[in-house]
Amino acid sequence: MAQFEFKLPDIGEGVVEGEIVKWLVKAGDQIVEDQPLVEVMTDKATVTIPSPRRGKVIQTVGKEGDVAKVHGTLVILEVESGGASTAQAAPTLPAQQAGQPAPLQTAPSGNGDDRRVLATPVTRRMAREMGVDLSQLQGSGPQGRVMKADVLAHAEYRTGAPPARAPAPRVESMTQDEVRPLRGLRKSIARSMVQSHTYVVPFTFVEECDTAALTAMRERINAGLVKRGDAKLSYLPFIAKALLRGFAKYPDLNGIMDEEKQSLIVKKDVNLGFGAATDAGLTVFVVHDVAHKSLREIGAEIDRLGAAARENKLQLQDLQGSTFTITSLGRDGGLMATPVVKHPEVAILGVHKIKEYAKPVRLPTGQTHVEIAERMNLSCSFDHRVIDGHIGAAFLYEVIRALESPELLLVDCC
């Protein structure tokens, strides 16, 4: 028999680490090839890592809640000798030479340990020129990446300027309190919200939309779909199409921020993120290439990905590459909200519930009568660093005009 060290493989472009959400095996288990070993979360995707070999689990490296590095050791297996693949076998580590597997590195509060510091060559050169030790910095970028702003803040603090951020207050828990560590999706959501709060300078614009014509057209379309045995359309595909008209006139709204280069990247493809409430927390799945999909195709993708989100079956590609996000709580949408921009995007649209109201109408005779009308509030938050107030307002009005004249959305004939 021989030992085989299985390392965390590449699990997505730009992904350098993942949180161990749940171990599916334990020491002493006999496993077969392709048997699930562990669930690992990266960004907002939870992926199941299968075993490349059959054998006996000698040791799992790391606890649930720890952070595993890509190409770092996950599992030590006992396998039949002579069948090991040199391409999969891990290189010998000093700790292994002593008979111990290398310990998994956990996510510390800063970068001041012996793990590899994430930083671009530009940031590294700046740090060298300013005499700043990157390993002593708290990286504010994705996956703890040290940004140029972190280097500058540290240099200013070293010369007597106030620190960039105050330390977190110490909180004590009582014996009777329940302590719930942030793990899995909830921890990822928290990290994403902190990132948005760190970078985005937000403002929110709210306006109402008359949805009577849209509701009537949607009902007619759905009646035809039901007769053919097809799935009904929600309001979201129509809103997605209306956004396209807004992007056509104000393309900067379909952009993402490059913090390192301090540049706005205006995207040509429209990939819309949709917030989905799950038992574990809010997940944002992505419908790609919306501009080249019909209303029915958009609706089918929303239904498929929404179901996958609730069943925790989303794939990594289903959560990556969004350029703009729509968040809607449906009937629980309330009157308005201030949605949080999903960095590095620069805008997000909040969709609220449709409400009926009494609308006075003046007749040609001069008399008035009351009609029942309906309206829906739309709240759009923007990154004020790159989107000015009048541009954000004009963009939302363009979207509203399309929704109030829904025939404009039917150029693709559904």
Image: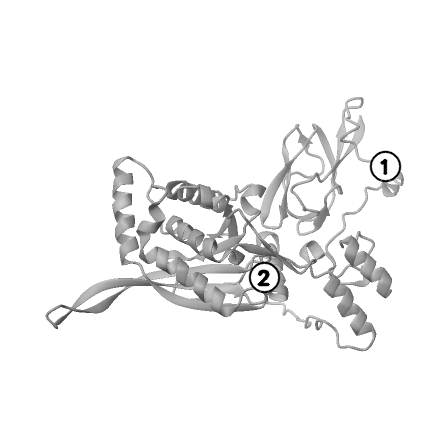
**Residue drawn at (24%, 63%) of the image:** 373
Quarter assignment of residue 315: top right
Compared across the picture, whether 360 is left or right of 16 comes to left
Closer to the N terminus: mark 2 or mark 1?
1
Considering only vertical position in the picture, is 360 above or below 186? Answer: below
Residue 249 percent across, percent down from the top left: 46, 56
**Label at residue 92:** 1
Q: How crowded is mark 1: few (under 14 residues within 10 Å), some or many (20 or more)?
A: few
Q: Distance between the residues labelled 2 and 1?
A: 39 Å
For label 2, the residue is 193
Considering only vertical position in the picture, is 359 above or below 280? Answer: below
Quarter assignment of residue 133: bottom right
Compared across the picture, whether 319 is left or right of 219 comes to right
Residue 368 percent across, percent down from the top left: 14, 71
Instruction: Name the residue nearer the viewer: 339 or 8.
Output: 339
**Residue drawn at (74%, 44%) of the image:** 61
Residue 244 visible? The answer is yes
